[in-house]
Amino acid sequence: MTSPMKLSDLAASIGAELSGEGSVEVTSCATLEEAQPGQVSFLTNPKYVKLIETTRASAVVVAPNIKSDRVPLLKAKDAYYAFRNAVVALHGFRKHPHAGVHPKAHVDASATIGENSVLYPGVYVGARARIGRDCILYPNVVVYDDCVIGDRVIIHAGCSIGQDGFGHATHRGEHHKIPQTGNAVIEDDVEMGANCSIDRATLGSTVIGKGTKFGNSIVIGHGSKIGPHGLFVALVGVAGSVTIGRHAVVAGQVGIAGHLKIGDQVTIAAQAGVMDNIEDKSIVIGQPAMPAGQARRVYSLFTQLPEIVERMKKLEKLAEKYMDAAKADSETAAAASSDATPPGA
Amino acid sequence: MTSPMKLSDLAASIGAELSGEGSVEVTSCATLEEAQPGQVSFLTNPKYVKLIETTRASAVVVAPNIKSDRVPLLKAKDAYYAFRNAVVALHGFRKHPHAGVHPKAHVDASATIGENSVLYPGVYVGARARIGRDCILYPNVVVYDDCVIGDRVIIHAGCSIGQDGFGHATHRGEHHKIPQTGNAVIEDDVEMGANCSIDRATLGSTVIGKGTKFGNSIVIGHGSKIGPHGLFVALVGVAGSVTIGRHAVVAGQVGIAGHLKIGDQVTIAAQAGVMDNIEDKSIVIGQPAMPAGQARRVYSLFTQLPEIVERMKKLEKLAEKYMDAAKADSETAAAASSDATPPGA
Amino acid sequence: MTSPMKLSDLAASIGAELSGEGSVEVTSCATLEEAQPGQVSFLTNPKYVKLIETTRASAVVVAPNIKSDRVPLLKAKDAYYAFRNAVVALHGFRKHPHAGVHPKAHVDASATIGENSVLYPGVYVGARARIGRDCILYPNVVVYDDCVIGDRVIIHAGCSIGQDGFGHATHRGEHHKIPQTGNAVIEDDVEMGANCSIDRATLGSTVIGKGTKFGNSIVIGHGSKIGPHGLFVALVGVAGSVTIGRHAVVAGQVGIAGHLKIGDQVTIAAQAGVMDNIEDKSIVIGQPAMPAGQARRVYSLFTQLPEIVERMKKLEKLAEKYMDAAKADSETAAAASSDATPPGA
């Protein structure tokens, strides 16, 4: 894809230590199994260590403790990050087919778009919205009026930022719309997958914190505030007025109920249903979401319920036997005591 | 945002009883914690009653039983609805940047659009579709051919109304598309969040009933009929041919299997998996969805499974002891009985 | 909708055996309950067999063993497929309001669009993307650069094909984007509901196999490979690097964790959480997903947990009684043994 690069130059550029011939030229990246000569691969999962012995890659980015006689290694403490940098060096990021606001995008006259931002066809930016610099808004992204997008934000196709939150006052059986007077704020360096929906706040702002990354089809309710540097996988639903701290890891299809406070560095497992506040550094799993240790025990026993109930049935059988025996005993005792009754009584 | 309003006028306009100085001027709304002088706030959750003592708001909408010496109160039986009306009075609803059909929307020549409806850029309305009056279709909403949208309907960005339902006849291992000849009907006063997908029916109509409100990313299968005045939170999936009565409350990420009949005034808790019909006025919770009372007991015990199994282990230990004792007894008895055997037998 | 057709002609065209008067004319299809004279209906679920006695349909497509004196029958081994063919014969598929690429679609100059494909307004096709022949891309579908769409593919409104996968290398608390150098490949005869999101691969391709049908709002992670002829209902989330075999049936809201291998002809029940590889021909249910037999036992006991714990409480009570009795016995025994002690001891 790009011009070839010497291994020695690549090593220098990604901060890796080269073990092997530096003059080898590489042009692109691939997995250990699919790599061809001229390609760089990586090994971060020890499970795949044997593939080093069979890969056709011209070099492999690895952790410092990995050794090989047959393939040049690029050793780095954080091998995954070093490989990422190799991908950047060899492939680079997408070249956009146009600069700035595409004529088929629609930007309200009162909105502002920062320098060097790219808006694809079909993008809509509403009144008074502000888009920072170096942003990429892919086709058909919608940014409602008054919303604020930081710098270097990437929003993939079909996302909607700042639609009205789910606010209705039910009166005499009908739901009356509450004007959603707030906005949505997407801070610097956020990336969002396709078809996400970020509600604007009723009052104030919904906030997606700096550096947070979203997968596809994530829904964030009005007034929620997501801390910086979170990772949210896909199909996650966060209700309204939720606060989530920094460095959250939220797996696919997680649901978080309204008005909760989730601490910093919290990990939430896939499909979990969060119904209570979560403290800093907690890992929670399950529906309802429980601390990981408890959840692992609970789910392990859950899948064994048939065996557990079998064990209980054995106890019940034994209990029946015991009661029969006790009954027999007491009858024997009664008989004995009646036997013991002096004949003349 | 708007021109200031005297508290006495606001009280009159929202049908509240003013306790305090009526000449105070207010301009906007905010939460109790964030409100500044000149802003109106509200209290509907008794949990936050203490904030009345510290809020900087110029007035608070409250239930009739709330008292305060320090801040003017706007008392109303349905305080949340009264506050909603205050937001409407002070903020109003969104002013659209254009009237009617935006030139960057696409409306088929055979479609009809009612008076005063606003279609944003990127909206698509297919052949013979009918949009009522006073509707708002936000950017990139798609209404397929022959679909019908009532009056005062609000559809947020990226929704698709009337795409083909999931209808395929599998024959010899291949899935053959069944023409989806029906349509989708969105009745009056419905509001829909971003990125919802409403299938058209195979035969007949998929119907979203009058006044029903949807959050984001809701999927409704072909031929389903949702009753009037429902509330559906987000990421809900309703399969095909489902009937849901009036005033349903369906929380986030709920799934409802096909061909079911859900009664009136039914509440379904978040992430529930509905696999059976539900009677009127039921509340269901869980996967599989159960009546609320049962579900609360079941889930409470579920999270206690480790303790429950510990208790069972104790019983098992005791049972072992009992069996040992019984064995010992019977051996003793046998010995005793052998002892009792007359020597000369 | 179309010109009338004689039953004898319809029978011939769909390969059914007609039992009844062949000169009857029919014009369209409807359900047994809603059909009017002139309409053809179908019966595939034995549960509805009685409706044959009351339907107003002019003919009913049925399995060969069904009989009726009152309504002409169109008998076919695969009645559902025969009915599907009747719908095709009488209604046909959607007539598009335009041919080829609509002027309001945007196709990059380096992209290629096959013969007879229809691209609706708002569609975006990126650089070097290739769309096959006879495809339909409904409004606002986005196909990113370098992606490949086969022949006869139907993609409904708002889908995004080939956005960047969720790839970030976390280094010193910040998430660094990994260029997603691969693409997404949608093979021949795939149909996709509205608002689906198919990630492009980091390296190589994400693949949706030939003839696979997706419902709405399905998310497929980067590098996953879905086999041919699958059925995926709606709101399904498949993480990255998953392999799914042929003829999968994946119900609504299923989640599949990353790097798993799902075999051929696997069925996954609604809302299941798949955390392990699945063998060919398995049916799995539940969170976590279990083999169907186990899952049915587990969930049946799960919903009975309150009764199960009641049974355990009974055992505990009995155990207490037993222990009291044992204690009393041992006291009696002790007393007896003390009684038995010879006075002079």
Image: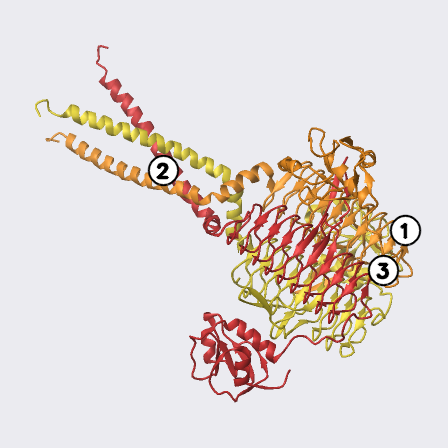
Chain colours: A red, B orange, C yellow
Q: Are marks 3 and 1 in contact (CB under 8 Å)?
A: no
Q: Pick out the residue farthest to the left.
A: C344
Q: What is the C-alpha distance between the residues marked 3 and 2?
A: 72 Å
**Which chain does the numbered disc 2 sit on?**
A
Vertical placement of residue C104 versus C66, above or below: below
Q: Is residue C1 left or right of residue B180?
A: right
Q: Amino acid at mark 1?
A: Asn
Q: Is residue B265 left or right of residue A252?
A: right
Q: Where is C342 relative to C5, above or below?
A: above
Residue C32 versus residue C138: which sits nearer the camera? C138
Of tags 1 and 2, the one toward the viewer is: 1
Q: Label 3 belongs to which residue?
A: B126
Q: Nearer the viewer, residue A72 or C45?
A: A72
Residue bearing the label numbered 2: A318
Q: Is residue B86 among the parts visible in the rendering? A: yes
First-in-chain label (3 vs 1): 1
Q: Which mark is residue A76?
A: none
- Which dot marks residue B116? 1
Subunit ID for the residue under disc 3 = B
Q: Nearer the viewer, residue A128 or A24?
A: A128
Give x and y (percent) for residue C115: 80, 76
Q: Residues within 10 Å of mark 3 (few under 14, many from 20)?
A: many
Q: Quadrant of the C terminus of chain B?
A: top left
